Amino acid sequence: MRLLIIADTHVPKRARALPEQVWREVETADVVVHAGDWVEVGLLDELESRCRRLIGVYGNNDGPALRARLPEVVRAELEGLRLAVVHQTGPAKGRERRCAAAYPDADVLVFGHSHIPWDSLADNGLRLLNPGSPTDRRRQPECTCLTARVSQGRLQEVELHPVLRR
């Protein structure tokens, strides 16, 4: 199972649309995971119509229309892998400890908010992933997204990709 993991798209505030590179990844993904800050409901509609399966949450910049359609936290099982998705996890300091306590039933926690790519492992084995942003690099050298594979309950081939903006 192939995953595309994105967050903090901020369409159309930071970009008019997702970059074509991201749409190509959407086409090949079995599951698209979006960790919030969509900003407008149009991107949610487009992703729902173009991807095989979408797992998403709302973020702090998402208004009532998105909050009506998306949860704050979502959990899903993907071929035995226990996935949790949330937008915010708080400060970087102590993140692994806090998230391990908050999501003891998850194998992987995907989050967003900071626009800073993150890949770490908590003491209990929880893997924390932040894909950065494919549209708003902020203080990062480039925009980014993540791809990964799930097989037999394990996350494999996690890869951070630079995203070229139009």
Image (cartoon, rainbow, N blue to C red):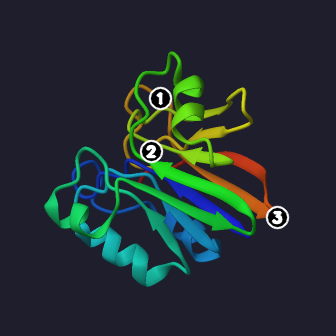
The residue that mark 1 highlights is 140
Is residue 65 shown above or below 114? below
Residue 160 in the image: x percent, y percent?
Answer: 65, 44
Residue type beneath disc 3: Ser
Q: Nearer the viewer, residue 77 or 91?
A: 77
Numbered badge on residue 133 = 2
User: Is disc 1 surrounded by few (<14), some (14 to 19) or many (20+) residues within 10 Å?
Assistant: few
Q: Quadrant of the N terminus?
A: bottom right
User: Horizontal and vertical percent for residue 135?
Assistant: 39, 48
Residues at badges 1 and 2 in contact (C-beta under 8 Å)?
yes
- Give whichever of 70, 131 is nearer the camera: 70
Query: Is 140 situated left or right of 159 in this image?
Result: left
The residue wearing badge 3 is 151
Ranked by sequence position, the earlier of labels 1 and 2 is: 2
First of labels 1, 3 by sequence position: 1
Characterize the local packing of mark 3: few (<14), some (14-19) or many (20 or more) Cα atoms within 10 angstroms: some
Q: Are marks 1 and 3 in contact (CB under 8 Å)?
A: no
Question: Count the marks: how many?
Answer: 3
In the current view of this chain or complex, which residue is farthest to the right?
152
